[in-house]
Structure formats: structure tokens, C-alpha cells
Amino acid sequence: MLRNLFHDASRKNMILVSGYVSPEPGRCVQCGICTYNCPIGIDVRLHAMRGEPVRDSRCLTCGECVTLCPRGVLSFEKASPASLKQGTGR
Amino acid sequence: MMRRYVIIGSGAAGVAAAETIRTLDASGLIWIVTADPDGYYSRPGLAYYLTGEAAREQLYPLPNHYWKELGLRWHVDEVERVDPEGHRLVMKGGKDLPYDRLLLATGAKALLPDTPGINLEGVLKLDTLEDADRLLKLARRGQHAVVVGGGITALELAEGLAARGMHVHYFLRGDRFWSGVLDETESRMVERRLQHDGIFLHYNTNLVEVLGRGGRVSGVRAKTGDDACEMACSVVAVAIGIRPRKELAEQAGLLVGRGIRVNQCLQTSHPDIFAAGDAAEVLDPRSGEYVLDSLWNPAIEMGSAAGRGMAGRMTPYQKLVPVNVTRLGGLVTTIIGQVAAKRDALLVDLDLPGIMRGDSEVFRQHPDAVVAQSLHDGSRLRLYLSGGRLVGALIMGEQALSRPVQRLVRSGEDLGELVPQLVAPGARLDEKLWEFVKN
């Protein structure tokens, strides 16, 4: 069990440093559930409408928006080290 | 002189047109004329407002200052008629509004059956945010509601009212849910989930009369086969389909079919009047037929193409293979292209004889195709193969494959050796497709 816990924590850390939320804009109907549920107030919907990945350095990759989107618009993508440097930090 | 653009309708097509016009014409006057006092909001999001997953204010994707920055003028009123030769709109409020280019993005309206009692207070539909507000006002925990109709909107109504604590009785005229698009396995998957959520399904059941007391709904009279019954309820929610709003076009003498007929650049039969979105009937290049659909993203694409034409940059609208993503009984479902095969053509969806929201007539064009299907880990995958190509797909549950499958359908790529593997008895379609798209 401890091993599992350790594994889960490591995996979460890995996403935190190397993953980001990516939209498939063709699936989005602008309902706003993602933005409404983001714990730190990122306008995820705006990213989805524009087809832009959430490269906001405040993003916790907590997965709330990914899980709650009723249309499967959002998913986690692995980030390359180069793309991580593009984070805006806004 | 500044060009005057008038757009009738504040939905996805109308707003996309306005945004596009502004990118091409920085100084033109753009009016959006709408009878909807709530302006632009996520109409598909109404379902989640009903369930409580989305807050009302969250349904507005764009802030008020955005419209100012875009230099848009809003006019809330109903249009009495369009005068094509005089290039003006006559408003119900008595005002005239002149235009140089006009867009009819008038959308579609929900149909109501001609059942006795249908005009009683408490009979509801789901066209607008105002309708959703009315539903929530009347939804009372512990009381009974009847939902009538088929497909996505009826399901959203049933789920929304159940989420608000009502005892929901869902009447299906046929013997399963959405038989025009889903196969029996898929219908049953959805139905089981609805029943699990406490929704009572009544198959082969027709609404005969809405009963009232003091002008308000008090119950319904229904018939299941030869058995008649009465049921007390305070709400009757109806979703039996939609019809394009084409009346203004008809009155103006424009060419109409089931919707407003447009050419490839979304121009109507009058060169200065365009149409887009649910109201427009467009040519499907694959079938050569004029088709209707009621989908969010094609409405945006049509609005953008119409906006380019209005601003003088005529651009053919390329109608893509339609895709809809929806949630059926909690299962995310993607529908791509043609998903009802020829052998199913005799099946008539009694609950939805026409089109509904979230629907495309292309879904029910019956290809001469072979079907391959598999069910694994609670997810469903159904594929239509014709001439070695994928012409349609339905993906219910796990969605990882939806993007590559969409790409395969839209590109019309020859699947070659994959076809016999997909149609082999007991084939795991997901595994075969993954192998194919990875190589």
C-alpha cells in the first residue's frame, strides 16, 4: 500500500512538472464547467475556445477540468522540456 | 461609406459571423438583432445548468466588454419582416433597420405536439436560457414530471429534472431510446443508467392529453399499447424535435426547402442576404443532398464563412463530416458521419421523426456499409466501413480513440488490410485501431 502511495505521489509530481491540459476545440460547446471548477481561477474555457493548451504556470494539473468536462474536450499531454519553457506565468 | 451589416440571431453562427466581419472590416457597422434578451450564451450548456453542474452566469463565454471592443451594437426586438429590395428590416417594435448585407442566423425552434392541453402552464421545452429558468422555477423536489420525446434534448430534460429531485417519468413512443442513431446495445446501456438514476422509463407510451387545473398542468393521460392510464404531475417537458426558423426568409420570397436554401458561399437566393447555422440548409458534397444539422461547431464554421462573404471575401463553406459529442446517461458519446446502416433504414424513430438539437441528417444517411462493433470495459465502439474506408463511427464511454477515428472518417483514408481484421467475429476494434493509427 505504501508503495502504491509512493507511486501515486511520484506520478502526480511527474505530471506537475511535465504535463499540461490540452483541449480538442471541436468538442467544446463553451459551457464553462471547466472554468467554473478550476480551483485557481484559470479561464480554461477560453483556452479551449481558442484551441490553446493551458500553459499557465499556475495550473496545478489537478485534473478537475479534465474530469468534469461533460464532452471530453480536455486531456493531459506530456510536455517536452522545450515546450515547458513557453509557460506564460500569467 | 461604412457598410452596414445586420445579423438576425445571437447564437453561435451569428456571433461567429460578427467576429469574422470585424476582422475584415474595421469600420463597418455591425448590428446583432435578437429576440432573446439573454444574448449570446452556451445553448448546449443549458443541460448542465439544469443539472446544477454549471452556474447560470457561467453560460456566458464572453464578457460584456468584449462586445464593446468588437464594436457590436445589440438590438433586442423581434423582426416583423425583411424587405430585400428596400434593404431594410421592419421590427415588431415599429423601427426600421437598414442594411447592406444581412445574415439570417435565426436558428431553430422546438416543436410541440398538437396534443390537447399542450398550452397549459407547466408544459415546457428547452430552446433558450429563459426556458431553462422556467424549468428550474417549476421543478419541485418530490413532485412528478413527465418527459416526452427522444434523443439528446429529452434526455437532458429527464436528467435535469431528476437532478432537481423530481420523480421523472420518461415516455418513449418506441421500444428503446434514440433508435434512429443508437443500436439496441447502446440504447440499453443508456436506459440502464437512466433507471439507475431513478428515472422511470415507459416504453411504447403515447401522450394523449395534458390535464390541467386552473390553467396549470395537473397530470397527463397516456396510452401504452391498448392500456390507457392517468398520471398526476406538475411538469410536462417536451423534446420531439426542432424546425428551422425560416419564416422571415419565406416572407421575403427567398428560396427555402426544409430550411433556408443557401449556395456554397452561404448566400441565399438574394445576393445580399446570407444564412447560417440551424436555419440554413446546405449542400453535403458527399451525398449531393441539401441537409440540415443542429450542431455547435458547424454553426460557428458556417457563421465565419458567411461573415467572410458579407465582408466581400466570398469563401466556399466546406461542410465537413459532422461530429457531435454528447453525454448520454453519463457516458460521453461521439458520433461521427453516417452511423445508421442500410439494413436499419426501415426502423423509424417514433420519438424523433425529424431533426433535433445536437443532430445532423448526415448521421442517418444510410450508407451501403458493413458494421463492426465491440463492447469492452463498459465502452462501446461501432464502425461503418464502406469501400475499404471508414464512413461513420460511434464511440461511447472511453474517448481516447475519438480523435484518430474522426481523422480517419474525415480523410477517407483507405484502411487496406485493417478492414478484414475489423469485421472478423469477436475482434477487439479498439486494439486493432490503435495498432493501425500508431503505425
Image (spheres, rainbow, N blue to C red):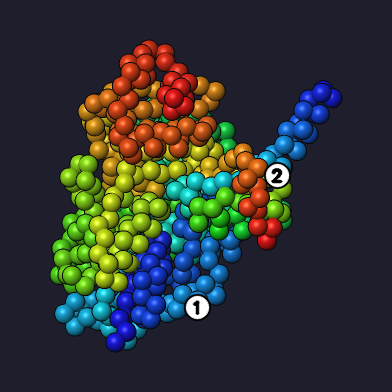
- Given the image, on which type of amino acid does mark 2 rest? Cys
Residue B232 image offset from top left, x and y in percent: 50, 48
Residue drawn at the location 72% of the way across and 48% of the way down: A60
In the image, residue B99 sits, relative to residue A35, either above or below, namely below
Q: Can residue B165 be seen in this view?
A: no
Callout 1 touching callout 2 (CB < 8 Å): no
Residue B120 image offset from top left, x and y in percent: 41, 61
User: Which residue is outermost to the top?
Assistant: B425
Side (left or right) of B72 relative to A74 = left
In the image, residue B385 sits, relative to residue B77, either above or below, namely above
Quadrant occupied by the N terminus of chain B: bottom left
Residue B52 image offset from top left, x and y in percent: 60, 53
**Marks 1/2: CA distance?**
35 Å
In the image, residue B320 sits, relative to residue B392, either above or below, namely below
- Given the image, on which type of amino acid does mark 1 rest? Lys
Mark 2 belongs to chain? A
Q: Mark on residue B186? A: none
Local crowd size for mark 2, using a 10 Å CA cut-off: few (<14), some (14–19), many (≥20): some
Kindly identify which residue carries mark 2: A62
Side (left or right) of B198 relative to B210 = right
Q: Which of B329 and B415 is in front in this view?
A: B415
Residue B161 image offset from top left, x and y in percent: 54, 49
Q: Is residue B82 visible?
A: yes
Kindly identify which residue carries mark 1: B68
Residue drawn at the location 38% of the way across and 67% of the way down: B20
Q: What element carries label 2?
A: loop
Q: Is mark 1 on a helix, strand or loop?
A: helix
Q: Nearer the viewer, residue B363 or A85?
A: A85
Quadrant occupied by the C terminus of chain B: top left
Q: Nearer the viewer, residue B423 or B333?
A: B423
